Amino acid sequence: MRAATLTAFGSPLKVHDAPDPRTGTGEVLVEVLATCVPPYAADVFSGARRYPLEPPVVPGVGGIGRVVSVGPDATKLKVGDVVWCDSTVRARDDALTPDITLQGWSSRGEGGAELARYFHDGPFAELMRVPTENVYPLPAGAVADPARWSVLGVHTIPYGGLLAGRLEAGETLLVSGATGNLGSSAVAVALAMGAGHVVAPGRNRAVLDLLADRFGARVSPVELSGDEDTDRAAMAAAADGQIDMVLDLLPPEAPSSVARAAAMTVREYGRVVLMGGVGMLGGADLALPYPWIMRNSVTVRGQWMYPRAANVGMIRLIATGALDLAPERITRFDLDQVNEAVAHAAAHGGPFDRTVLTPGAGNR
């Protein structure tokens, strides 16, 4: 097969011939048709994000594929099926707190690193070996445009946070970091799930206007000033009522004060879900007042990625049209253009602007 390999942090990806992956029981071999390139991929490959990725590695985060072979333990998957391959791989020997790796991308702790050394390579290749439980059949409509369906890799992340916060139909949600790639996705997914109102704070006026134009009166944009107290008051006022839930998706470079200002808009008995990267690169920690949490009975929880069932839920939201992928701007790159794709993703990381790599031999 052809593959794009990160040989060392700070080096361009190298496209070359590589041995086809060998699969065993509990594994599926897929031809990779399309995979989204994250806007921050360049920071991962340079080492700036300090991800626990071990080169040489074929990187990437999930993708759409066509099943080439299945193991004897698969009872429903068939050769030729078009599927979504979830990157969130969980160890099979601990049902309560399994070690986790994001195949081809990241991991958590030593156990996750050990798992990553086996499920090492991701979708920047013509073929990929995937655990059987990470492969999800897609409806017929996905066959016509796998590149568009590959944005599952974006939307399922905030969907996991919304599930963690138990978002209910009609509720008011505040998305902290709404003008970013994942934050804008959270706005779209929350509305598809039935949120009654979404408060969307950010500093980019153009993106705020884009969100308002796309989603109408159910979205209230708030342009942030940088002053914590002023911004908290502005966000609360924009809700025109109580804020039931806050979902934080701010990037690592965002100051913790911005996350705190958003979190503290939530109502009594409200929920705050933390999914962003605040503090990952240093800086002040998120300091939420103990008395405020306790006396207002606020639930604060973290969420990394999403549970397995979220993949099925997201596929249903798209298949039924509740989440419309038509407005997504898709720019496609062949595998040989992988470094151009990484640069393009970095320069086009705004809302609903997707860079997609199409590695499969069938795409040529």
Image (tube, rainbow, N blue to C red):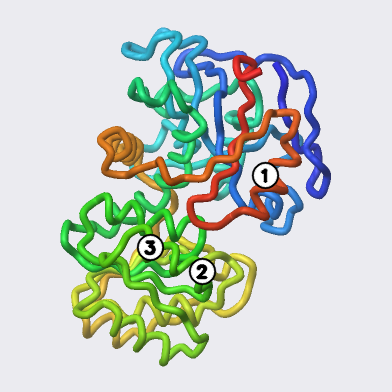
Q: CA distance from mark 3 to mark 1?
A: 39 Å
Q: Is residue 316 visible?
A: yes
Label of residue 213 in the image: 3
Compared with residue 109, is residue 32 higher up or lower down, i.e. above or below?
above
Decide: few, some or many residues near mark 3? Use Cα within 10 Å; few <14, some 14-19, many ≥20. few
The residue that appears at 50% across and 23% down in the rendered structure is: 65
Decide: few, some or many residues near mark 1? Use Cα within 10 Å; few <14, some 14-19, many ≥20. many
Q: Position of residue 63 (x, y in %)?
A: 51, 32
Q: Position of residue 332 (x, y in %)?
A: 61, 35
* Lower position in the chain sequence, tag 2 or tag 1: 1
Label of residue 206 in the image: 2
Left or right relative to 143: residue 245: left
For this rendering, which residue is in front, 269 or 152?
Answer: 152
Split into 4 quadrants, where in the image is the C terminus?
A: top right
Q: Look at discs 3 and 1 and give the one toward the viewer.
A: 3
Q: Position of residue 322 (x, y in %)?
A: 26, 43
Q: Which residue is mark 1?
A: 53
Split into 4 quadrants, where in the image is the N terminus?
A: top right
The residue that appears at 52% across and 45% down in the rendered structure is: 329
Compared with residue 115, is residue 237 higher up or lower down, i.e. above or below?
below
Q: Look at discs 2 and 1 and give the one toward the viewer.
A: 2
